[in-house]
Image (cartoon, rainbow, N blue to C red):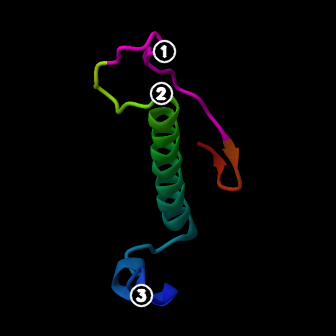
Amino acid sequence: MKKDDLISDDFLKQFKTHEELTGFLKQIQKRGIEKMLEGELDSHLDYDKYQKSTDANVRNGHTKKKIKTSFGES
């Protein structure tokens, strides 16, 4: 698959300003980072979210965090 095939021109036409496109990219980046961190935690704990664990190392909720990126804080 070519890079140009990943996102259609019709999809990109919906963004009329730089701010709209940047806002969309920030959302994609935020969701991607969250999914990667969830996967890393699943791998570290060796069980998926909402599964029971027989181990003492358990998920204990989460808190909001901000990271600084080239798109600003997420």
Residue at left offset 50%, top offset 33%: 41
Name the side, left or right, on which 14 lies relative to 24: left
Task: Judge the density around disc 2: few (<14), some (14-19), many (≥20) Cα neighbours within 10 Å.
Answer: some
Name the side, left or right, on which 11 lies relative to 4: left
**Mark 1 → mark 2, Cα distance in angstroms:** 7 Å
Q: Are marks 1 and 2 in contact (CB under 8 Å)?
A: yes
Name the amino acid, label 1: Asn
Q: Quadrant of the C terminus?
A: top right
Is residue 58 depicted above or below 38 in this figure?
above
Of callouts 3 and 1, the N-terminal one: 3
Q: Which mark is residue 57?
A: 1
Task: Judge the density around disc 3: few (<14), some (14-19), many (≥20) Cα neighbours within 10 Å.
Answer: few
Q: Residue tagged by mark 2?
A: 45
**Mark 2 → mark 3, Cα distance in angstroms:** 37 Å
Image depth: mark 3 or mark 1 in front: 1
Residue at left offset 36%, top offset 78%: 11
Q: How many marks?
A: 3
In magenta, the rendered stretch is 53-67
Frontmost residue, 41 versus 15: 41
Q: Residue tagged by mark 3?
A: 5
**Helix, strand or loop at disc 2?**
helix
Magenta stretch: includes residue 14: no
**Helix, strand or loop at disc 3?**
helix
**Helix, strand or loop at disc 1?**
loop
Task: Judge the density around disc 1: few (<14), some (14-19), many (≥20) Cα neighbours within 10 Å.
Answer: few
Frontmost residue, 70 versus 55: 55
Of callouts 2 and 3, the N-terminal one: 3
| Relative image position of residue 31 (x, y in whole percent) | 45, 48
Name the amino acid, label 2: Leu
